[in-house]
Amino acid sequence: MTRPSALMRRAMAEADVGDDVYGEDPSVNRLQQRAAEIFEREAALLVPTGCMGNLAAVKTWTRPGAEVICEVRGHVNNYELASMSAIAGCMPRTVAAPDGILNWDLIEPLIRAKNYYTSQTGLLALENSSNMHGGTVYTREQTDAICERAHAAGLPVHMDGARIFNAAVALRCSVADLTRKCDSVMFCLSKGLGAPVGSMLVGSRDFIEKAHITRKMLGGGMRQAGVLAAAGLVALEESPKRLHCDHENARHLAVGLAQIRGLTIEPKKAVTNIVIFDVDAHGKTAAQVSAALKESGVLANPTGKFTIRMVTHCDVERAGIERAIAATEKAI
């Protein structure tokens, strides 16, 4: 929902460009180099969308017939049109986790025994922050422990880090430290970072070379993509500095919503920029409440029959939070 800033628009207008399919776009090359530096990895790759980044990772790490372990409400399992099955030929193997945060006790029973007559486990996918659980986060210690056990079992770990910068800001650590033991990471330049288009895939040089081929196969080869990369560079350098404002606004929103009689929400779970609440007690569906909110100029998505998600970002000021709280009270 964010709009590119004036600085992004100026950078886009003045961007040096070339043919990225031939690796000749200087702005794309700078963005990829900078992303790799920030995550302390060997290489990075610009992809048009986070969905393509996740799919490229799945397809690069696995082969058809493999299973991908993920949390049941994870983005890769719910909002990517079953692309891991339709295109990569893999099956999701899911488990529900408290607040969306997996641990080894939940993961280990899903790993297939090594034999020739069952599907084989090919990849473990984590999501940080966890979108459908209200922006909950894996700590560095949790992620490291999972990665160590997964690697001992011969499994690579991919991090769907669409909002990894939000997680890092909430935990007061670097994205490099938070993802160091993951084998690959996807993160969005849009969403919290505010760029109009684009996501990044980071990892080893060998992984990125293979993912580059996969990107082309999926139709992700772009020409003068520097006009997009220029905005991405601004987002990468400038936007993380202000993500704490979004988190403060989300907490203010959650506390305000909690004051509305009969609305179910746990404000303490609003640790990043996502707030999810339940309207079941009022006898209205989330879709009905969402439609009423829209009439008041507040956009919020139903995430279930009775649950609604609100997200704070760089275009939402504190005054907007107050209007959203008032509109929600009116709607229900």
Image (spheres, helix red, strand yellow):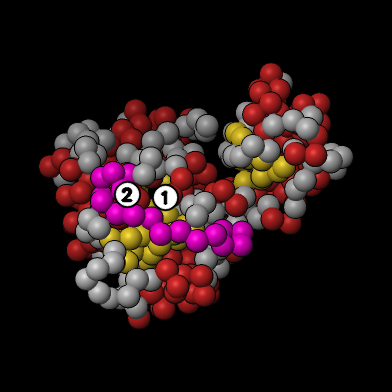
Compared across the picture, whether 261 is left or right of 320 comes to: right
**In contact (CB < 8 Å): disc 1 and disc 2:** yes
Question: Residue 256 vs residue 159: left or right?
Answer: right
Magenta range is 83-100
Work out whether residue 250 or residue 282 is closer to the camera in this orientation and state it: 282
Which quarter of the figure is the C terminus placed in? top right
Amino acid type, label 1: Val
Visible residue check, residue 233: no
Q: Which mark is residue 84?
A: 2
Foreground pick, 14 / 115? 115
Looking at the image, the residue that sits furthest to the front is 117
Q: Amino acid at mark 2?
A: Met
Outermost residue to the left: 22
Q: CA distance from mark 1 to mark 2?
A: 8 Å
Residue density around tag 2, few if under 14, some if 14–19, many if 20 or more, within 10 Å: many
The residue that appears at 31% across and 33% down in the rendered structure is 227
What residue sits 66% from the left and 23% below the top? 291
Q: Extreme top residue here?
A: 295
Residue 76, image x, y percentages: 41, 50
- The image quadrant that residue 25 belongs to is top left
- In the rendered image, residue 24, in percent from the top left (x then y), is placed at 16, 42
54 or 188: which is nearer to us?
54
Whether residue 102 appears in this view of the structure is: yes
The residue under label 1 is 76
Mark 1 burial class by Cα count in 10 Å: few <14, some 14-19, many 20+? many
Question: Which callout, 1 or 2, points at the residue further toward the start of the chain?
Answer: 1
Residue 163 on the magenta span: no
Kindly state the secondary structure of the residue where label 2 is placed: helix
Asked if residue 270 lies left or right of residue 264, the reply is left
